Image (spheres, grey):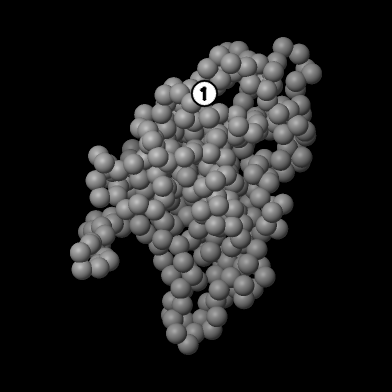
Amino acid sequence: MSPVFISLDDDQLDFFCIFRYVGSDVCGFIGTTTEELCLRWQQMGAFHSFFRNHNTIGAPAQDPAVWPSVTAATKQANLFRYQYLPYLFSLHFAASQNGGSVIRPVFFEFPTDAETFNLGYEFMWGSRMLVAPVLYQGTTSVNVYLPTDRWYSLFDYKYGSIISPGYTTVSAPTTSRIPVFVRGYSVVPRQTPAITTTATRQNPFELLIAPCQLGKGEGTLFWDDGETIVNDFNSHDYHRFDFVYNTTSTGGLLTINHSKKSSTISLPTLDIIEIFNYPKAPNFRSFTVNGTPVNINVQKSTYSGITKILYVSTEGLINLTSSDSIVLQWSNAGSSMFDIDVGVENGKMKALNTNRYEELYF
């Protein structure tokens, strides 16, 4: 793959690998688009590193506000993108530091699976997420191929549920997110989106944990000031956190290693942890951070025995700079009094509204 060089000024060149900084002119640059084409393109483009609706001079307007349906779909897609911006930023940071890709073909992750070799209508968002956009006119479903692994739905259809590998047809109406799946063995950082990225950076961190078949997961967060250009990684000021999760026979264990520290960049606390396929109701009174008991907010924290989604939300839950190594640990409940089952529909809506940003923006 040939690199692309973009001139910034007389003294600087910015270098990008195509798979690192890739995108398109959303809704099309030449010719007149349609409402449906623009809607589906906005949904897909939200996962591209370079994301803009771009049109030629003199062409009919095609910004999302032209059609109410495109407006709604774009807001929904954009909020998902900005919810997971810490993950996307970390992908770019790692690719810039070590080489690699951000947007990648599925066969990059599954090179021995022949079904992925010509799988041109799906792509990976890093190693943790698989995206299957809607590409055909008039369709409201996608025939998705998931390579052999543990996968969970990360969109409206069966959110948080295990989706079996192989070919499967999933619902994809214009009013929902396009199909997105998170891979088992993942710990993915995120934040509740605000009006601007500057404001979003002040919101508490969150983690989405999607365990593998063995109940384990890993992930990484890179975090700098969001503005300084990196000239040398050895002198660049940033944080790095490595997350390791284990479902134990009696509870759960999350270890956070602060492997690279900044003395100048402040950090919000980690307040929310959402875990898919958690096997049993936790004892919310048993949570500890490095051995010190934590008062979990049981009004905001839930567990559903039907969806198997554990959602822990407590203001100031973990101060990420408090120690080089932080261990959050808890045990499962010994009686049904902790088995808070909100039901299938309510459980689904709780999960979909995990960050409650629909209340702010819709």
Q: Residue at x 46, y 73 (%)?
A: 54
- Foreground residue, 53 or 320? 320
Q: Identify residue type, mark 1.
A: Leu
Horizontal relation, residue 174 to residue 165: left or right: right
Residue picked out by circle 1: 254
Could you tell me residue 316's position as x and y percent? 60, 32
Q: Residue furthest bottom?
A: 58
Instruction: Specify the quadrant that holds the C terminus.
Output: bottom right
10 Å neighbourhood of mark 1: few (<14), some, or many (≥20)?
Answer: many
Horizontal relation, residue 73 to residue 219: left or right: right
Query: From this viewpoint, is residue 104 visible?
Result: no
Q: Residue at x 59, y 46 (%)?
A: 192
Q: How many numbered marks are there?
A: 1
Q: Is residue 67 above or below residue 315?
A: below
Could you tell me residue 142's position as x and y percent? 56, 54
- Foreground residue, 330 or 178? 330
Horizontal relation, residue 75 to residue 31: left or right: right
